[in-house]
Amino acid sequence: MSRDKKDNNIDKKAIRQEKRENRKQYFFVIRELTSREIKRRYSRSYLGIVWSVLNPLLMMSVLSMIFSQLFQRSIENYPIYYLSGYILWQMFTGATNAAMTTLVDNKTLLIKVKLPMEIFVLARVYTALVNLGYSLIAYVIMLVVFRVTPKLTMLFAPVIVLFLLIFALGISFILSTAYVFFGDVKHLYSVLLTLWMYCSALFYPIDSMKGIIRQVIEINPIFVYIDCMRSVVMYGVIPPADEIARMVVWAAVAYAVGYAVFRKNKNQVMQKI
Amino acid sequence: MKVVMKRWMKNVLAAMAIIVSGFLISDIHAEAEGEISRFGSESYEWVQGTESPIGVYVESDEPMSYVDMTLQYDPQMLQYNSGGELEAEGRVRISSGAGNTEQFSLMVYFTPLRSGTTQISITNVTVQYASGETSTATDASAPISVPLPAGCALSSLTVNGQPVPGFSPDVLAYSVDVANDIATANVEAVAEDAASAVQVSDTTLAVGMNTINVTVTNSSGNQVTYTVTVNRAEPVTSLDPVSEEHPGEGEVSAEPTVQNALARLTRGQIIFAVVLVVLAIILLLLIATLIRISRNKKRHKRRHTAAVNRSRTGGVRQPVKRRKPVERRGETGQAASGAEEAEIKAAASEKTEERKRQVHPAAADKPEDIKKTEETTSAGKETAAGAATGKAAPAAEKATAAATPAATQGAQAAPAEDEREIEIDVQHVTMEFKREKDEATSIKELLIRTLKGQRNTEKFKALDDVSFTVHKGEVVGIIGTNGSGKSTILKIISGVLAPSQGKVTVDKNKIQLLTLGTGFDYELTGRENVYLNGAVIGYTKEFIDEKYDDIVKFAELEGFMEEKVRNYSSGMVSRLGFAIATIRDTPEILILDEVLSVGDMFFRQKSEKKVKEMMHGGSTVLIVSHSTSVIRNNCTKVVWIEKGHLRMVGGPKEVCAAYEKMNQG
């Protein structure tokens, strides 16, 4: 009996060691896959990665041109208001859209290599995070240009991004699984995303909305993240406790549900592919 | 055909044009027929305290005999003087004969009381024609602005210490948002002229919109009113009913808010709500479908397990139980059960038949039996060594159940193998794919099928009860025609797929699956692909850094590595793939999936040499191929799988011969 236990202990240690090595290897794979995604996306363009910086800037200037007149009274610093929301929104859509098709795209890899399936989803979401990193360059430049004074509360921003990332990961798990079985998901989701965007108060002030829409917007998880980001960066206020709680709960629920769905369907996905 | 199409298109276009123009014409016509009421000018600018005229017109294309209408104005801003008859404060009735003209006009006089902007509108216009028929005309309204008299302007206006956004002395209306916790607005207004008096209306705030008037009166008695609309935010925690109750509002407000909410529903919101409802319905349907599917699956599973149990009770005991007697025998050295006795018998008879290498014709039909006997041999001999008894025993025991002459005749095992450990143990592996007959590829289709109950699934067995073992150091070839399940068994062995029945015992960490160009990305350069592919097949970064030059050298791609793989020839791609895959130290179990036919002749020799090296390094090798020559040259044992069934296990010569024979026949 005792020998068994000892063996078990040794086994456990070995397993732990092995797991650590595996994890390191998986990180390496994720990094390689991510760098592939990024290189690939810009492989035929001259500006390459600069687009990641340029895109939010251009979007910002276009929308500011049109809407800053409209919301002059209710939003004091429209470009920053918009940009804060836009980069987060971009990360979310980038992550979920890319992750949705990842299992199908990497079919051959999945079949021939014994890597955990999660890695492919993780790699796509991580790609979106890296992209956000580049967009942040644009964001910081704009913060300086529009003279937003640095505030201590800005340190809270990475936490918001982290929760958004977990939320996006959960949604990605669900979408990627669903996409294996139904190609329709892609089209449905793109419609849903448009609706979602308009309900996220990306480019209009939330106060201008009344009634049901307002409630929908306030329930909308993405809006919670965007709103937190704005209050942290623009107004120098730590968001109220209930907003933080909602942020955490959304992330946790999305991740838990997503991962459960993903795991449950793992074998079916393998067979289907 | 094209001409016909074009003519057809033309017809459609013409029809569309006619319809559109018809609409346009009818539209214009409709407008021309209506009666119009209007003011003399688009807008008016009056001076405070001075009587000013405004012209009211009604036009029609038929002569009118009588006109009746109501003018509405803001009695706070304007004072009615003359022109019609005053019905009430803010409403002037005008009814007059029109003298059978097509245009009716009338002057009405007002005096502005204070500056600001307001409007006058014409409503309820009724026209009587000479014929006695009556008709109504459109409503109209005109804005009236009264500029600020001297001294009435404000120089600053603040709410709660913050200047109202966009303040300018000429603009009289502002809106401000405040948080929910502010119950009273602190409005401070400073007039430009110190002699003017400033008066601020009630500043208590209810939740929602509040209007605060700031009235400035100058020394000559002229008044200007600035309005500030203060929007007090709704309580943040709507869950907390206490905070919603507000002093001064009480219960009375509850009912109106519901009505207000309904009244405030614009068309846009209704559309929005409809869209939401539709989405919700779609979601519900999806969920319902999923539940149905999973229920079906469960039922299916139950049925399946029941069937399996039945077969087990009728035939072989369960695998867990099977191990016991063997272990006991290892300790006692005695045959403890009838089954084992039979087994030993089988082993003994096998020895006598050992040199009968030929494949018995019947053996092809009972491939499992052959294999089992082989196991029996090893099990019998290995009891003393004991290393692999646990694994070999089940098979041995199974053999006892069917120790038929045919089985014993087909014995194949080479004596040398028996001493080695079993590296891969595949037991009764069955792989079932559930396939829907013409599978639904869209949600819509799936829904329709599910609702109709038409989702008949068809089971497809890629592998049916396949068992074999691979000993350490063996080079085992797996042959079979296309689609016979070779790749499936490899996937199961390497752990990518889980079998639906049976089990595979193997140390998954030792396995190295060698496939070419897995995860090559043609948009990346050669160098980038080495890292990507290396990472995917399990190399660490340090390892690739170290071996990078060797890889390039082996692949003979010096000078091409910074080029995109898109521009490589196919031979170059496979050479690179082979180099990456084989650069590592020889793994303990190597699986080659159609690898040995890569590149030109020279590279093929080189790669075959490399693979031989790896084989002689003591690793266990599994080769999948449908080329018998590769297998004949390299393997020590061959497993033939045909249409999911194990056809034969044995030496390369026999199995290859049989395989070729079958293909010819």
Image (tube, rainbow, N blue to C red):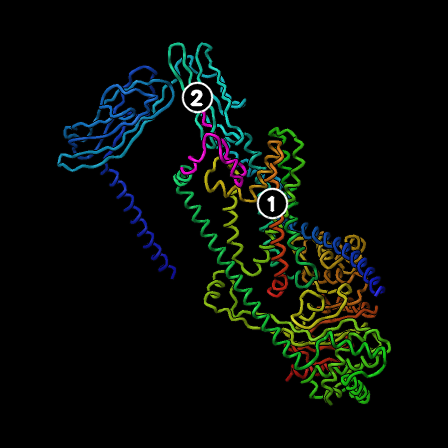
Element carrying mark 2: loop
User: Between marks 2 and 1, how big is the CA–CA gap?
Assistant: 49 Å
Determine whether B40 is above or below A172 in the image.
above
Callout 1, which amino acid? Met
Determine whether A192 is above or below B70 in the image.
below
Q: Quadrant of the N terminus of chain B?
A: bottom left
Element carrying mark 1: helix
Residue identifier under label 2: B201
Residue at 53%, 56% in the rendered image: A185
Q: Name the one closer to the observer, B217 or B332.
A: B332
Q: Is residue A2 magenta?
A: no
Give the numbered dot on residue A91.
1
Horizontally, residue B188 falls left or right of residue B587, namely left
Determine whether B379 is above or below B509 in the image.
below
Tell me the magenta residue range.
Answer: B226-255
Q: Name the one closer to the observer, B435 or A263.
A: A263
Q: Quadrant of the C terminus of chain B?
A: bottom right
Q: Looking at the rendering, which quadrant does residue B35 occupy?
A: top left
Q: Residues within 10 Å of mark 2 (few under 14, many from 20)?
A: few
Choose mark 2 or mark 1, whichever is in front.
2
Q: Is residue B237 magenta?
A: yes
Q: Is residue A36 visible?
A: yes
Q: Disc 1 is attached to a residue of which chain?
A: A
Q: Horizontal and vertical percent for residue B153?
A: 44, 16
Q: Looking at the rendering, which quadrant does residue B145 occupy?
A: top left
Q: Residues within 10 Å of mark 1 (few under 14, many from 20)?
A: many
Q: Horizontal and vertical percent for residue B402?
A: 72, 85
Q: Name the one closer to the observer, B65 or B577.
A: B65
Q: Horizontal and vertical percent for residue A99?
A: 61, 53
Horizontally, residue B261 falls left or right of residue B625, namely left
